[in-house]
Image: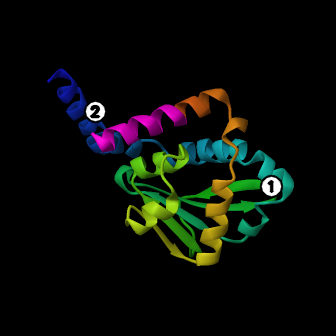
Amino acid sequence: MFKDALSRIHHSIVKNGPTALAIPCAFIPFNVQAKLLAKILGKMFAEAIEDGDLDFLESKWLKVTVNDLKLTWYISFKHENFIISETCAKEDVSFSGNSNELILIAGRREDPDTLFFQRRLSIQGDTELGLEIKNLLDNIEMDKLPDVTQKGIKYMSGFVKGGLQA
């Protein structure tokens, strides 16, 4: 009985937590979001940047939307740096999903293709560019990320996976 109650609470947090987080996220100024996101991406993809693996994204725009948090970023790449913008003339490809699905992908607890076919992840626009980005994400070596990032992703993805199964 106690275990069932905990399971229901866990499920409720996973299901309803992002809605509660959308409110404070709305108050984070875009320039703060952009600086933080550029820094995180720079660290995550440092090796890929060094190897020239992100050159395909130059002069291209990726739109990333976290639906339930009401967050949208336009991402490009130029001169070995990520460019994060609040708007762009026209995105080449867009990825959108809810925060739980994106956490599951980051923690490698769900395959993006599976989520796409279940309509829990949307990819629209230039299919070839979308596949290049997906392949780049698949090749991130998690063990090269800072320990705190690895542990955070592992914990959050496990928490979400367990709450969705409850």
Compared with 117, 69 (above or below) is above
Q: Amino acid at mark 2?
A: His
The region drawn magenta spans 153-166
Q: Main secondary structure of the magenta part?
A: helix
As shown in the figure, which amino acid type bears the numbered disc 1? Glu
Identify the residue position indicated by label 2 in the image: 10
Left or right: 80 in relation to 60: right
Q: What is the secondary structure assignment of the residue under circle 2? A: helix
Residue 157 lies in magenta, yes or no? yes
Q: Residue 19: horizontal and vertical position, in percent? A: 29, 45
Disc 1 secondary structure class = loop
> Which mark is in front, 2 or 1?
2
158 vs 95, nearest the viewer: 158
Which residue is at a point 47% across and 45% down the rendered structure image?
A: 103
Residue drawn at point x = 32 percent, y = 39 percent: 163
| Nearer to the camera, 66 or 106 | 106
Query: Which residue has dot 1 on it?
Result: 80
